[in-house]
Amino acid sequence: MSARGNTSGSLATGRFEVSAAPGAPASPGVYLTVEQELLPQGYCFDFMGEGYAAEEEISVWLRMPDGSVSDDGLETEFLSESDGSFGYYVCFGRLSAEGTYAFTGYGNSSGRTGIVEFELERGDYIEAPNDATLIVVPGEAEQLDTVTLIGTGFLPGEKISLWITLPNGVVLSLFSGITQDGTFEEEVTVPPLPIGTHYISAYGHTSGIRAVATLELLPGDGN
């Protein structure tokens, strides 16, 4: 955590660590399975739960690859079947963070809990040749520095989307825009992302052409 005085320019930095809290353990006699243990981004995972109370309200959530817990976008608090089972599926977008997830199903009345892990890997949905080029200037920067992204070889007037893949596999959208003569140049202020090698991808929506460049991110000084 950094604090800077806007008038004095004085800077102080403190460090703290957040660890995962212990979650509810899996209950004996509860079985939660996933049909596909490994799929690429853009696909859906199918889950089956057994051993819950009949027609009880079920809550579900995900443990994300970074250790955080979320139920965003999930249909939760639905009822199990008369035999205590339920089916569920979770779909991921092409920019979802890759890595190991855990799916939890919790019976609100019985307190029974099922947990199963699964893996989301990087997907590649672009079959066109990589004829375009993408350059990051400079190729090595500190957190909060400004870099310039220069793309060439795309179609005139086509929509371009750019995203960045972090060293831990998380994928974040950067921006989208329209080329002029098949080229673009965009200045981007690099957020305080994890240090290391980042991969920046550019994709032309009409041509299907893509280009990839690397950015080596170094620790910033807080200014």
Image (tube, grey):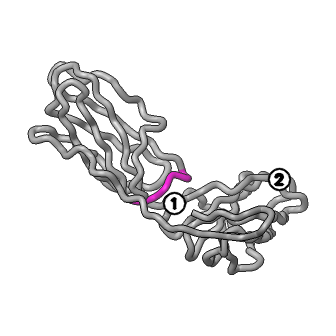
Disc 1 from disc 2: Cα separation? 25 Å
Q: Quadrant of residue 129?
A: bottom right
Reply yes or no: does residue 58 show up in magenta.
no
The quarter of the image holding the C terminus is: bottom right
* In this picture, residue 223 sits left or right of residue 49: right
The residue sitting at 55% across, 53% down in the picture is: 95
The residue sitting at 14% across, 41% down in the picture is: 27
Mark nearer the N terminus (1 vs 2): 1
- Where in the figure is residue 181, as x and y percent of width and height? 90, 61
Q: Quadrant of residue 113?
A: top left
Identity, as a three-letter code, of the amino acid under mark 1: Val
Tell me which segment is drawn in magenta: 94-99
Residue beneath disc 1: 170
Q: Quadrant of residue 196?
A: bottom right
Identity, as a three-letter code, of the amino acid under mark 2: Ile
Tell me the SS state at disc 2: strand
The residue sitting at 69% across, 62% down in the picture is: 202
The quarter of the image holding the N terminus is: bottom right
* In this picture, residue 111 sits left or right of residue 187: left
In the picture, the disc for residue 178 is 2
- Where in the figure is residue 190, as x and y percent of width and height? 69, 66
- Where in the figure is residue 213, as x and y percent of width and height? 67, 73
